[in-house]
């Protein structure tokens, strides 16, 4: 739909991932009808791009507000295909006003609210909730020589399954280096090792730390939930980086089946040089080096390359009416995790709803005309 310039939405939510869907649901419960803009072709589109080997923890922690699931599934880990389907179904079942196929290019702010320049025209809103997450902005360290090396390399965000590597190497064997020490690094080298590739791991620091095994995580998730609640109540500050899973990844490292290297010092034309002086050849390097907040569309408001916004009570301390959900350490170390997003969504929705209630009654809800999809934008309802 190409919105009319005169149409001012009460609340626009950017992103139809878990954060955007959760806050939209909570706003509807409070009598405020938001419009959710999603650049992908479905709700939860970013989750369709995740590696298929990734898990998102037990369903117990990952259900969005208003969801229910058979008790037998509560401790099972959410898989990438299942969670992507769940997000699409959640938007449909709750009739959330999600408009897909809308790429937000820039946002400006004036006394009347926000103006959003998008791939389908201009949108205006009184309040804005940014829920664009991290996974559309993969981060690769700027290693010396990386831009000129002939060593093939990719970010783990481009990895789907072993077929991805076979297409690059044109064979089912080869020497592959994974760079990183967190969850995605371990899951990637385990899967490729099991597919017959010779795997190595490069990481920063002196020692790898491992989390629980898959079964251990499931068994102890209720206890961990209790301890997390206590630590949050006591305002204990922790890092938000998930450890490499125990089990197969730990076994392969400790047995030497996956060789380990220190941090990369530089790339030469055909080799990788490590900080301990070793120099090796690899057929492919996969960077499992994380992501940065996807906020390029907010540069005109927050400055160039905004990373973590300055917040006060879930709202930008610089731009009134601009709220965030899913930002690292927004409230606690859980805020960028699914389980933290679910909790924080209620707080953000309450704050936004109170602000929206101050608007004239005619501006608190979307009219049928404003919700009618046209052109390349698709409304999910």
Image: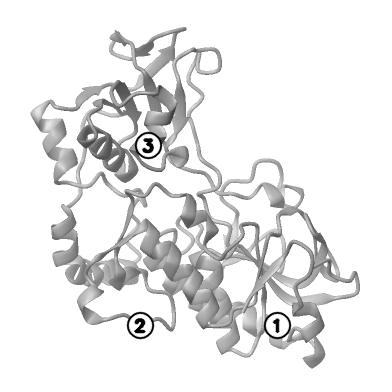
State the image coordinates of residue 123 (x, y, percent, origin top left).
80, 66
State the image coordinates of residue 21 (x, y, percent, origin top left).
54, 72
Q: CA distance from mark 3 to mark 1?
A: 48 Å
Indicate which disc, 1 or 2, sits on the residue closer to the N terminus: 2
State the image coordinates of residue 134 (x, y, percent, origin top left).
52, 50
Q: Is residue 23 left or right of residue 335?
A: right
State the image coordinates of residue 116 (x, y, percent, origin top left).
78, 60
Residue where numbered disc 1 is placed:
356
* Crowd class of label 1 (few under 14; some 14 to 19; many from 20; radius 10 Å): many
Quarter where residue 174 is shown: top left
> Which quadrant: the N terminus?
bottom right
Q: Nearer the viewer, residue 114 or 316?
A: 114
Q: Nearer the viewer, residue 49 or 148?
A: 49
Q: Is residue 192 left or right of residue 42?
A: left
Q: Is residue 123 above or below residue 139?
A: below
Q: For residue 323, which numbered disc appears in the image? A: none
Q: CA distance from mark 1 to mark 2?
A: 29 Å
Q: Are marks 2 and 3 in contact (CB under 8 Å)?
A: no
Label 2 residue SS: loop
- Residue 367 seen in the figure: no
Residue where numbered disc 2 is placed:
68
Q: For residue 163, which numbered disc appears in the image? A: 3
Residue at the left extreme, as displayed: 255
Indicate which disc, 2 or 3, sits on the residue closer to the N terminus: 2
Numbered circles on residues, count: 3
Q: Is residue 343 left or right of residue 59?
A: right
Q: Is residue 116 left or right of residue 50?
A: right
């Amino acid at each position: 739909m190409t919105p009319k310039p005169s149409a001012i939405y009460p609340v626009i939510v950017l992103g139809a991932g878990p954060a955007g869907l959760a806050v939209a649901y909570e706003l509807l419960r409070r009598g405020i009808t938001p419009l959710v803009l999603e650049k992908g072709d479905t709700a939860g589109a970013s989750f369709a791009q995740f590696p298929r080997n990734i898990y998102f923890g037990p369903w117990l922690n990952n259900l969005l507000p208003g969801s229910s699931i058979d008790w037998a599934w509560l401790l099972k880990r959410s898989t990438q295909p299942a969670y992507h389907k769940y997000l699409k179904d959640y938007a449909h079942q709750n009739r959330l006003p999600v408009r897909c196929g809308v790429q937000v290019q820039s946002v400006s702010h004036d006394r009347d609210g926000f103006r959003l320049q998008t791939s389908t025209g201009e949108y205006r809103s009184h309040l804005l909730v940014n829920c664009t997450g991290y996974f559309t902005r993969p981060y690769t360290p700027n290693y010396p020589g990386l831009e000129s090396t002939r060593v093939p390399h990719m970010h783990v965000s481009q990895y789907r399954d072993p077929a991805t590597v076979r297409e690059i190497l044109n064979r089912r064997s080869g020497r592959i280096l994974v760079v990183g020490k967190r969850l995605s690094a371990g899951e990637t080298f385990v899967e490729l090792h099991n597919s017959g590739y010779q795997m190595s791991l490069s990481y920063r620091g002196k020692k790898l730390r491992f989390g629980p095994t898959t079964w251990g995580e499931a068994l102890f998730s209720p206890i961990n939930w209790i301890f997390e609640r206590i630590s949050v109540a006591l305002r204990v500050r922790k890092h938000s980086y998930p450890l490499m899973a125990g089990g197969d990844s730990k076994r392969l490292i400790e047995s030497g089946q996956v060789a380990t290297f220190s941090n990369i010092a530089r790339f030469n034309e055909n080799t990788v040089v490590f900080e301990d002086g070793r120099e090796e050849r690899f057929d492919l390097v996969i960077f499992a080096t994380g992501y940065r907040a996807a906020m390029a569309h907010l540069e005109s408001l927050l400055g160039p390359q905004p990373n973590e916004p300055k917040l006060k009570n879930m709202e930008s301390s610089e731009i009134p009416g601009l709220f965030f959900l899913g930002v690292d350490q927004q409230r606690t170390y859980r805020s960028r995790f699914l389980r933290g997003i679910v909790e924080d969504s209620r707080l953000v929705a309450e704050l936004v709803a109170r602000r929206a209630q101050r608007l004239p009654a005619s501006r608190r809800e979307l009219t049928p005309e404003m919700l009618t999809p046209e052109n390349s934008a698709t409304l999910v309802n």
